[in-house]
């Protein structure tokens, strides 16, 4: 009899994995709280199209996407903007979120995945330490394992017993509270930099972007502390002053959401359980892109499940998924999470200094903000931070940058020592050391 895999939440990586497992003969069911036509957001996303091929998802029709332009990073002073330089063959595509969902759900259904929409997951069903199903508002569903694709604040992850050693909630400076809206265009001017990303805009701890599109102007404000839609409108005034193109009539979006911007989860698996996508914090820490990684991870997870000839789907057999993930992607994201923590510590003047003196240059900002190029962080040489010594006269910034270099070295070393074989004690001990590295120390 086919083994039954339950996917909790219709996250992108979960649906992509469901597709591959159904194609391999598994019985797969996805439980999603929204109706199918209410999934996702009313805006566009940018991601690496190669990740679709990796997850065996067909490319969308040509009229459903376009290639993204390079971002220009704006330091707090507004002086010395730095434009990314992404090679042409690594450019990401921009697509409506609802079209992305349509593409992956249609493909999954063709492969035999069954979807249960309008069904809210309440938590895992446990038998001792093993996850054997999910509790939903329509009753319990049991299966051979659960893939957790419920997003950043997953109720499945949050309700796992402590013995699994899996972090339940995000900590301070680990997610952005985000406001995003498409506004009318208040002028026909074509800005010199059509896609601007503001660092510590208006002295606030966070980022913001203003992108000029044909039909609208796109504003995103992301901060480490929650704020209201009314406050977002007040904050928008700063971006409007800087960008006359940004109108004041909301055409689409205009609400608050959350994005994890942190290192990947230190333990992603338990007996009968694996987390994927935002639920395992697979976003690029500075900018919060998570689609490409979720798609790539889906292949690693489905390969691991298919390869488990014991059919136990235990932490031991699923661990290989985490090992593969960290090797290919996670070990490159951990250093970026440390770079992100700079945003929580650095003053606007200090950040200006890094831009003005070319320490944060196009190469660095291409790596840190782009999901196709950040893997070059895997071969990143922490000694590069040594250049700070020669470039920076300010002692405090020198110390901060050198400390960052040292921490990046440590993160790289810790990722390299992740146990290759699962043992609860070894893995939890390793996870403690890894998590400790990202605790913010002023
Ligand atoms: C404003 C904004 C802009 C972004 N822009 C980009 C971008 O340009 N490029 C990019 O790559 N990424 C972007 N991201 C990040 C991206 O959305 C995520 O990283 C990506 O969706 C992967 O997350 P996920 O699919 O695992 O989780 P989610 O997108 O959070 O999906 C989780 C799913 O689970 C469902 N769910 C949650 N809880 C329950 C429950 N209890 N019961 C049943 N169902 C449940 C939700 O309804 C949802 O469908 C952006 C995010 C935001 C918020």
Image (cartoon, grey):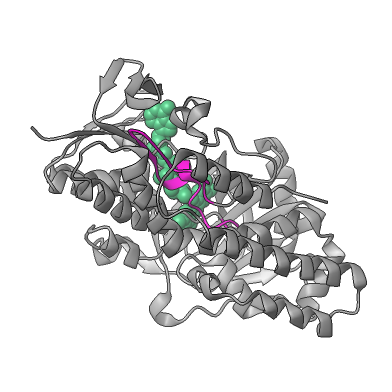
Residue 285 within the magenta-colored segment of the rendering:
yes
Question: In what quadrant of the picture does the N terminus appear?
Answer: top left
Which residue occupies 37% across, 21% down? 126
**Magenta stretch secondary structure, dominant:** loop
Where in the image, quadrant-wise, is ligand 1 located?
Answer: top left
* Quarter occupied by residue 401: bottom right
Depth check: give the residue in front, 280 or 311: 311
In the rendered structure, which segment of residues is drawn in magenta? 264-287
Residue 99 image offset from top left, x and y in percent: 32, 51
Please indicate, yes or no, whether residue 306 appears anywhere in the rendered image: yes
Vertical order, 349 against 313 (above or below): below
Left or right relative to 334: residue 392: right
Residue 78 image offset from top left, x and y in percent: 77, 70
Which residue occupies 69% across, 78% down? 383
Which residue occupies 70% across, 41% down? 172
Vertical order, 164 against 412 (above or below): above
């Amino acid at each position: 009899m086919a083994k039954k895999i339950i996917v909790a939440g219709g996250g992108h990586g979960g649906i992509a994995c469901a597709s591959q497992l159904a194609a391999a003969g598994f019985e797969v069911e996805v439980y999603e709280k929204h109706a199918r036509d209410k999934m996702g957001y009313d805006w566009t996303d940018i991601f690496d199209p190669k990740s679709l091929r990796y997850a065996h998802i067909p490319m969308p029709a040509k009229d459903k996407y376009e290639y993204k332009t390079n971002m220009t990073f704006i330091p707090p002073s507004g002086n010395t903007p730095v434009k990314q330089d992404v090679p042409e063959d690594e450019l990401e595509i921009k697509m409506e979120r609802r079209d992305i969902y349509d593409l992956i759900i249609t493909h999954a259904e063709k492969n035999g995945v069954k979807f249960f929409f309008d069904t809210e997951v309440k938590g895992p069903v446990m038998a001792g330490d093993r996850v054997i199903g999910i509790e939903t508002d329509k009753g319990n569903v049991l299966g051979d394992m659960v893939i957790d694709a419920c997003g950043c604040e997953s109720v499945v992850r949050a309700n796992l017993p402590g013995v699994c050693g899996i972090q339940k909630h995000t900590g301070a400076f680990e997610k952005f509270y985000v406001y995003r809206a498409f506004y009318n265009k208040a002028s026909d001017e074509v800005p010199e930099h059509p896609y601007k990303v503001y660092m510590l805009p208006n002295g606030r701890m966070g980022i913001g972007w203003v992108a000029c599109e044909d039909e609208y102007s796109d504003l995103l404000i992301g901060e480490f502390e929650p704020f209201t839609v009314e406050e977002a409108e007040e904050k928008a005034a700063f971006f409007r002053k800087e960008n006359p193109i940004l109108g004041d009539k909301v055409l689409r979006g205009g609400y608050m959401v959350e994005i994890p911007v942190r290192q990947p989860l230190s333990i992603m698996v338990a007996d009968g359980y694996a987390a994927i996508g935002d639920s395992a914090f697979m976003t690029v820490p500075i900018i919060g892109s998570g689609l490409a990684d979720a798609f790539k991870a889906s292949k690693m997870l489905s390969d691991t499940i298919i390869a488990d000839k014991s059919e136990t789907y235990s932490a031991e057999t699923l661990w290989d998924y985490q090992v593969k993930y960290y090797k290919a992607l996670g070990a490159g994201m951990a250093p970026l999470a440390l770079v992100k923590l700079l945003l929580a510590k650095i003053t606007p003047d200090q950040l200006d200094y890094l831009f003005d003196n070319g320490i944060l240059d196009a190469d660095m900002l291409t790596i840190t903000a782009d999901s196709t190029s950040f893997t070059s962080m895997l071969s990143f040489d922490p000694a590069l931070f040594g250049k700070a010594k020669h470039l920076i006269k300010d002692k405090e910034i020198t110390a901060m940058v050198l400390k960052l270099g040292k921490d990046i070295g440590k993160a790289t070393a810790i990722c390299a020592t992740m146990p290759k074989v699962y043992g609860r004690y070894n893995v939890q001990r390793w996870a403690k050391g890894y998590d400790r590295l990202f605790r913010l120390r002023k």
